[in-house]
Image (cartoon, grey):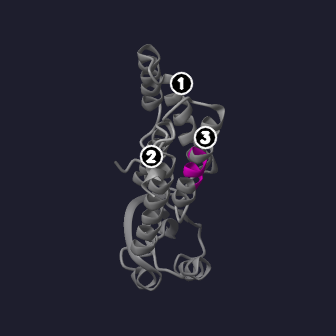
């Protein structure tokens, strides 16, 4: 039974072995990509990249194997790619390292270890996301009010009804000082109706301009 964890690269490197390792690396990438996209807002391009990354790493390590000069050149190329990349979210960076590790395992011929490693870590990722749950929805509210309206406490009851937290982050005058434009950062309660929230706000601000949109998540978390 333990033989399934041995490397397949024990003899001549044939086309069949290359194909098995390549397919195993693609399977690892598919598993990791599925776990990465679970309740995580990432682009389709990133998920596709995660699918293909183990196969790319496998191919590179296979070609570099035993050649010091080629290895140094590839290391330099990877360094250039690294410094042209933005630091993403912690989960996305973990997925990249996981994909690279699986690709390295397949390149070394440890197909079963690579697949099991990708599968186990991906399952743990999904379970942790379920355990901690999705993050609270963050919204940015821009609301215009007449200068006669006392805004500091006027919306507190609505914020208590629809939000978990509301912070005033920006205030400015407009229209020669006859209007105030306020900006709030909101943490919405689950199941909140945005339409009902806006309708209640319109009754308070004299039906002046209101806009609300989802706050873009800060990608640089590390």
Q: How many marks?
A: 3
The residue that mark 1 highlights is 63
The foreground one among 154 and 138 is 138
Q: Is residue 161 above or below residue 150?
A: below
Q: Earlier in the sequence, mark 2 or mark 1?
A: 2
The foreground one among 44 and 178 is 44
The residue that mark 3 highlights is 22
* Label 3 Cα crowd, 10 Å radius (few <14 / some 14-19 / many 20+): many
Start and end of the magenta stretch?
Answer: 25-30
Q: Residue placed at 56% from the left, 45% from the top?
A: 25
* Side of 170 relative to 36 (left or right): left
Q: Is residue 93 visible?
A: yes
Q: Is residue 99 magenta?
A: no
Q: Earlier in the sequence, mark 2 or mark 3?
A: 2
The foreground one among 125 and 14 is 14
The foreground one among 66 and 211 is 66
Q: Is residue 54 above or below residue 74?
A: below
Element assignment for label 2: loop
* Label 1 Cα crowd, 10 Å radius (few <14 / some 14-19 / many 20+): few
Element assignment for label 3: helix
The residue that mark 2 highlights is 6
Element assignment for label 1: helix
C-alpha span from label 1 to label 3: 13 Å
Q: Residue placed at 65% from the left, 37% from the top?
A: 16
Q: Earlier in the sequence, mark 1 or mark 3?
A: 3
């Amino acid at each position: 039974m333990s033989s399934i964890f041995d490397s397949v690269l024990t003899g001549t490197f044939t086309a069949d072995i290359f194909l098995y390792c390549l397919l195993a690396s693609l399977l690892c990438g598919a598993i990791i990509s599925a776990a990465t996209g679970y309740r995580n807002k990432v682009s389709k391009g990133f998920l596709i990249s995660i699918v293909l990354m183990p196969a790319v790493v496998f191919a590179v390590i296979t070609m570099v194997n035993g050649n010091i000069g080629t290895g140094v050149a590839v290391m330099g190329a990877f360094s250039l790619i690294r410094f042209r990349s933005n630091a993403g979210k912690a989960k996305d960076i973990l997925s990249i390292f996981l994909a690279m590790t699986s690709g390295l395992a397949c390149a070394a011929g440890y197909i079963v270890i690579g697949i099991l490693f990708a599968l186990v870590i991906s399952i743990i990722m999904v379970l942790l996301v379920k355990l901690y749950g999705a993050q609270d929805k963050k919204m940015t509210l821009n609301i215009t009010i007449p200068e006669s309206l006392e805004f500091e406490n006027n919306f507190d009851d609505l914020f208590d009804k629809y939000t978990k937290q509301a912070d005033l982050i920006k205030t400015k005058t407009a229209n020669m000082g006859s209007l105030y434009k306020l900006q709030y950062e909101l943490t919405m309660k689950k199941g909140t109706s945005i339409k009902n929230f806006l309708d209640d706000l319109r009754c308070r601000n004299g039906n002046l301009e209101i806009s609300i949109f989802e706050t873009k998540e800060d990608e640089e978390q590390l």
